[in-house]
Image (tube, rainbow, N blue to C red):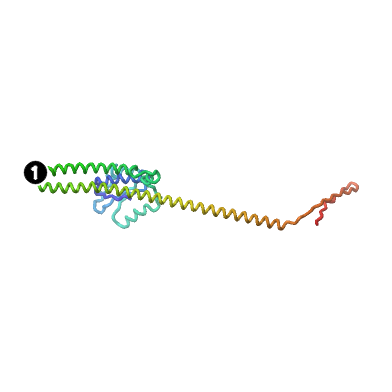
């Protein structure tokens, strides 16, 4: 579920939506809910108009809605929230695009589609901040030359803020990298655990089959021994005699003697 305020969609929100789509991949967007909020703060007609704008604008919800994402409204009530959660009750588990790339294709974060897009965005932000910082430094130089203390203080603060933003970008990138690497390790550990369980189960079944085969062989041997112990040696001697009397033939035999 992807919450989003219906009142506005700033640039950062659009970037987050784009990154979200890259992380998930187009294949599983049908399992995504695009939920609009703050309906209690707007007129119904105004809310419907803005919702329609979100759905029909490609860089907002348009592309995801076209690929199967479901649009819903949250009215800030418990009933509304429960209804949204229940939507996922019977949904099968899905593997995100970035999981496939990092776990199954063994790619590093910066090699994934989402990672490349993130790096592009961060590079743009860094370039923007560096440009702003250079301009601030130039203006500060002019303020120093003009002995404009007020402008100097303001520009110094702006310079500090911009430097902090650059550092935050770097930290966020490293934090995301660590998070994705941890996810990769956890998934690998999970796969190894499942593989071991399957191997253990196979060994148990194989051992059970061997025991059963041994048991059947033993039973057959016991039955064979029993049949041998019950067998009676018989010697048979056949005798044949024919007596002819008139047109009638009489046959006597074979005769069997037991001893």
Q: Position of residue 221 (x, y in %)?
A: 65, 55
Q: Give coordinates of residue 79: x percent, y percent.
A: 32, 57
**Residue closest to the eye, 110 or 41:** 110
Q: Which quadrant of the figure contains the C terminus?
A: bottom right
Q: Is residue 64 visible?
A: no
158 sits left or right of 174 in the view: left
Looking at the image, which is closer to me, 233 or 55?
233
Q: Residue 216 in the image: state x and y as whole percent.
A: 61, 54
The residue where tag 1 is placed is 146
Identify the residue at horizontal 57%, vertical 53% (top origin).
Answer: 210
Question: For the view shown, which residue lies furthest in the left direction?
Answer: 147
Q: Is residue 58 above or below residue 89?
A: above
Q: Residues within 10 Å of mark 1 (few under 14, many from 20)?
A: few
x, y percent for residue 236: 80, 52
Disc 1 is placed on an element classified as loop
Q: Is residue 43 visible?
A: yes
- Viewer-side residue, 218 vs 37: 218
Q: Residue at x 11, y 42 (%)?
A: 142
Query: In the displayed structure, does residue 218 sit left or right of residue 37?
Result: right
Residue at 17%, 42% in the rendered image: 135
Q: Write down the quadrant of residue 81 in the picture.
A: bottom left
Marks counted in the figure total 1
């Amino acid at each position: 579920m992807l919450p989003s305020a219906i009142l506005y969609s700033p640039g950062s929100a659009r970037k987050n939506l784009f990154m979200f789509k890259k992380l998930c991949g187009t294949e599983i967007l049908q399992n995504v809910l695009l939920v609009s909020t703050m309906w209690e703060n707007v007129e119904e007609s105004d809310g419907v108009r803005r919702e329609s704008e979100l759905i029909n604008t490609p860089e907002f919800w348009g592309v995801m809605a076209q690929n199967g994402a479901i649009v819903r409204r949250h009215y800030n009530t418990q009933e509304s929230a429960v209804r949204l959660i229940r939507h996922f009750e019977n949904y099968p588990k899905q593997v995100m695009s970035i999981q496939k790339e990092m776990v199954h294709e063994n790619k590093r974060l910066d090699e994934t589609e989402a990672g490349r897009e993130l790096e592009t965005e961060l590079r743009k932000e860094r370039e923007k901040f560096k440009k702003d910082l250079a301009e601030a430094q130039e203006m500060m130089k002019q303020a120093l030359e003009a002995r404009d203390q007020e402008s100097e203080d303001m520009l110094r603060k702006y310079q500090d803020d911009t430097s902090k933003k650059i550092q935050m970008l770097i930290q966020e990138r490293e934090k995301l990298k660590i998070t994705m690497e941890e996810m990769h390790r956890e998934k690998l550990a999970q796969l190894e655990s499942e593989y071991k369980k399957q191997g253990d189960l196979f060994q148990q079944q194989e051992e059970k089959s061997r025991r059963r085969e041994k048991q059947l062989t033993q039973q057959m041997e016991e039955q064979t021994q029993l049949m041998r112990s019950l067998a009676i040696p018989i010697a048979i001697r056949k005798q044949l005699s024919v007596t002819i009397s008139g047109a009638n033939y009489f046959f006597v035999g074979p005769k069997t003697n037991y001893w």
